Amino acid sequence: AQTVTQSQPEMSVQEAETVTLSCTYDTSESDYYLFWYKQPPSRQMILVIRQEAYKQQNATENRFSVNFQKAAKSFSLKISDSQLGDAAMYFCAYRSAEAGNQFYFGTGTSLTVIP
Amino acid sequence: ETGVTQTPRHLVMGMTNKKSLKCEQHLGHNAMYWYKQSAKKPLELMFVYSLEERVENNSVPSRFSPECPNSSHLFLHLHTLQPEDSALYLCASSQADRGINEQFFGPGTRLTVL
């Protein structure tokens, strides 16, 4: 089974600053998808950003961007101009490109934004 | 809000009780999932239903029993649970075909077993 590792249980960032959350994964597949999910306290888990492994260009969604390094099996999330509403648990997830395959999640990184 | 709803949002039960968790998705997806979320642990996939057939079990104890009567509804029947089963139970749905189809999550049911 694939494994997803988030080595930073907790991170903090000053409001308006930039923070990078790390994620590495282990797979022998060449075609897959990667995701970052955000789970605010007592709120629903929502998708932040996603990346297709065959695309070399890093995905960007407003203040959120990824640094996808396929050879290193690394998929970090960069949050620019951090806002108080960014405080949440962030989960990295992997899914094979084959139909019906399950998602594999990391243990999460708890992000605190300091005013 | 996403198109996945879960009820109840909170549940407290004794070890001898029988209860059920309900999940409903309004997104037209063909796959639904139950996850267990405990502190400092990865999301644990419990059950997957794709096209209303169970395709993954992951050795979940038999005191958890899933039911998927149609592609929009998913239940998790609980009986004789243990205190270590206390956790947040998340339901999710997705399209289970090729493509970058993300999962959409419900708000979860916070379960406490006394």
Image (cartoon, coloured by chain):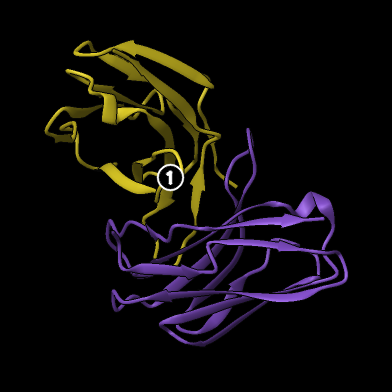
Chain colours: A yellow, B purple
Give left or right: position of B37 versus A30: right
* Up/down of B99 relative to A45, above or below: below
- The x, y position of residue A100, in whole percent, is 44, 67
Disc 1 residue crowd, few under 14, some 14–19, many 20+, Cα 10 Å: many
Q: Quadrant of residue B35?
A: bottom right
Of the pair A47 and B87, the residue shown nearer to us: B87
Residue A3 on image: x %, y % = 56, 38
Residue at (85, 57) in percent of width and height: B82
Image position of A29 with respect to B78: above or below: above
Give percent across and percent down for residue B90.
53, 58
Identify the image quadrant of residue B46.
bottom right
Q: Is residue A48 left or right of residue A8?
A: left
Quadrant (top left, top right, bottom left, bottom right) of the N terminus of chain B: bottom left
Report the residue at 56% width, 34% height from top. Answer: A107
Identified at 80% across, 65% down, the residue is: B61
| Residue type at numbered disc 1 | Tyr
